Image (cartoon, rainbow, N blue to C red):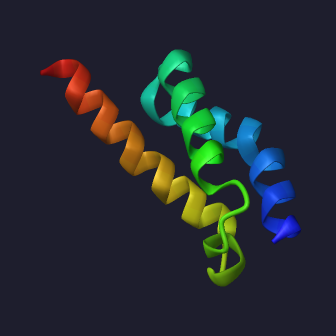
Amino acid sequence: MSGSINFARSFQQQLQDYLTERFGSTRLAQTVAHETVQTLDGSPILDAVGDPEIYMRGYALSLALKLNAEAES
C-alpha cells in the first residue's frame, strides 16, 4: 500500500497540469487534483489497477466534470 501512497502524492502536480490543460482553469485543476489525491491516497485500488496514472486521470476528469456542471447550474 505504501507504493500507492507515494505514487498518488508524487502524481499530484502532473495531474494538476493535465487538468489545467484540459479545462483551462488552474483553480479547478488545483481543487480536483487535491481532492483526487486525498481520496485515492493509500487506496488499495491503485495497487489493483493496471495503470494507476490512467485511473487517477479518469477519476479526476469525472470529478472535474461534476464540479463544472454544478458550478454552471
Image position of 51 with respect to 37: above or below: below
Residue for point 65% across, 83% down = 48
Question: Where is residue 19 shown, x and y percent of the image?
Answer: 54, 36
Q: Position of residue 38 (x, y in %)?
A: 63, 43
Check the picture and name the quadrant holding the C terminus.
top left
Q: Quadrant of residue 12?
A: top right
Q: Nearer the viewer, residue 19 or 46?
A: 46
Is residue 20 shown above or below 5?
A: above
Q: Relative to residue 10, is residue 59 drawn left or right? A: left
Rendered location of residue 5, percent (x, y) = 80, 58
**Residue shown at 66%/33% (left/top)?**
17
The location of residue 24, given as percent across then percent down, is 47, 22
Corner quadrant of residue 70: top left
Q: Residue furthest left?
A: 73
- In this rendering, would 18 be left or right of 58? right
Name the foreground residue: 51 vs 8. Answer: 8
Q: Where the N terminus falls, by quadrant? A: bottom right
5 shown above or below 61: below
Residue at the image position 32 percent from the left and 40 percent from the top: 65
**So how many labels did they put on this image?**
0
Q: Residue at x 86, y 68 (%)?
A: 3
- Of 72 and 39, nearer the camera is 39
In the rendered image, the vertical position of residue 58 relative to residue 52, given as above or below: above
Side of 37 relative to 71 (left or right): right
